[in-house]
Image: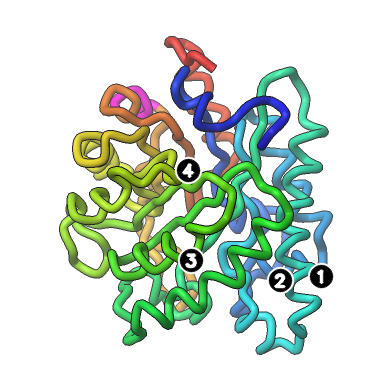
Amino acid sequence: MSIQGSLADALARGVVVLDGGMSNELAADGHDLSDALWSARLLRDEPAAVAAVHRRYFAAGAQVAITASYQASFEGFARVGVDRAEAEELLRRSVTLAREAADEAPGQGPRWVAASVGPYGAVLADGSEYRGRYGLSRAQLRAFHAPRAEVLASARPDVLAVETVPDIDEAEAALDAVASLDLPVWLSFSAAEGRTRAGQPLAEAFALARGNAQVVAVGVNCLAPEEAAEAVALAAEVSGKPVVVYPNSGEGWDAAARAWSGPATFSPDRVAEWTASGARLVGGCCRVGADQIAALGAVLSAGTRGV
């Protein structure tokens, strides 16, 4: 638990600001993210670059750093010649880099580290996390998530971010995989048009959090900003939990071209509607940068933030 108090306690008091996308800030700094490991490659090759992005977000007013472990896995690292022992060290390093940045952050406010537990589809590096339904059993998905989550937990983040989950089966498998770990969890689905990316009703997805004491927040990320408010309201109603929401920029990901296209629609002014609907963890995902997180924090500070 953070020496500055638990995240669950903070959510009971008010709104907590998350960071934005890691990859867009790294790309803006000139780093090549074209390989299958994406930003996770820099955990091995240029960890100082990852730390610099964490520091930038804290300087912009974020209170939570999400680790660069979204696309980090034993399977993915093995494909580029990283053995299991080094992979474990790199997973732990993702938490350490975020923790050091939190400790160094300016100001006196609370800071937390969320260890990203990304979906199985991210490891495939082919856009599968935007579809789900990988053809794996729930047991196979649990076997994928459990070892990675255990290593991340051993580095003592404040919370596990089970994020960008595209379908209910994977969410159930991931929650089962982390159930024995002594850490709180937030559960966040990738969604479109009121459904998970695999096509299931979001109400059924959010219901997984109801009655699960380990889950301190449930909601959505990496969805279009204009869909966020409705999803937040539904998550609050169905789960009875604080809601987490961090949309992407509104652009679309072309997995074949490995590029974003279309207009950006993320606006910090939307945050008032999200919080009015029950959001207590708010930030940005892909293509949302430090300047936008700073603007989002300014909107919240103009109201009553509570933390």
Q: Position of residue 45 (x, y in %)?
A: 81, 70
Would you call the spot at circle 3 few (<14 residues within 10 Å), some (14-19), or many (20 or more)? many
Q: Are marks 3 and 4 in contact (CB under 8 Å)?
A: no
Which of pointers 3 and 2 lies earlier in the amino acid sequence?
Answer: 2
Residue 4 in view, yes or no: yes
Would you call the spot at circle 4 few (<14 residues within 10 Å), some (14-19), or many (20 or more)? many
Tag 4: amino acid: Gly
Q: Does the segment drawn in magenta span residue 196?
A: no
In the shown orientation, is residue 106 left or right of residue 189?
right
Distance from Cα at disc 4 to Cα at disc 2? 22 Å
Q: Which residue is mark 3?
A: 177
Q: Which residue is mark 2?
A: 41
Tag 3: amino acid: Ala
Q: Which residue is mark 1?
A: 45
The correct choice, above or below, for 217 with respect to 16 in the image is below
Tag 1: amino acid: Asp
The colour scheme applied to this rendered structure is rainbow
Mark 1 lies on a secondary structure that is: helix
The correct choice, above or below, for 56 with respect to 189 in the image is above
Residue at figure coordinates x 35%, y 48% from the top left: 220
Q: Are marks 1 and 2 in contact (CB under 8 Å)?
A: yes
Distance from Cα at disc 1 to Cα at disc 2? 6 Å
Tag 2: amino acid: Arg
Q: Are marks 3 and 2 in contact (CB under 8 Å)?
A: no
Provide the residue span drawn in magenta: 269-273
Residue 27 in view, yes or no: no
Q: Position of residue 259 (x, y in %)?
A: 48, 69
Residue at figure coordinates x 20%, y 41% from the top left: 238
User: Which label lies toward us, 3 or 4?
Assistant: 3
In the shown orientation, is residue 228 left or right of residue 176?
left
Distance from Cα at disc 1 to Cα at disc 4? 26 Å
Distance from Cα at disc 3 to Cα at disc 2? 25 Å
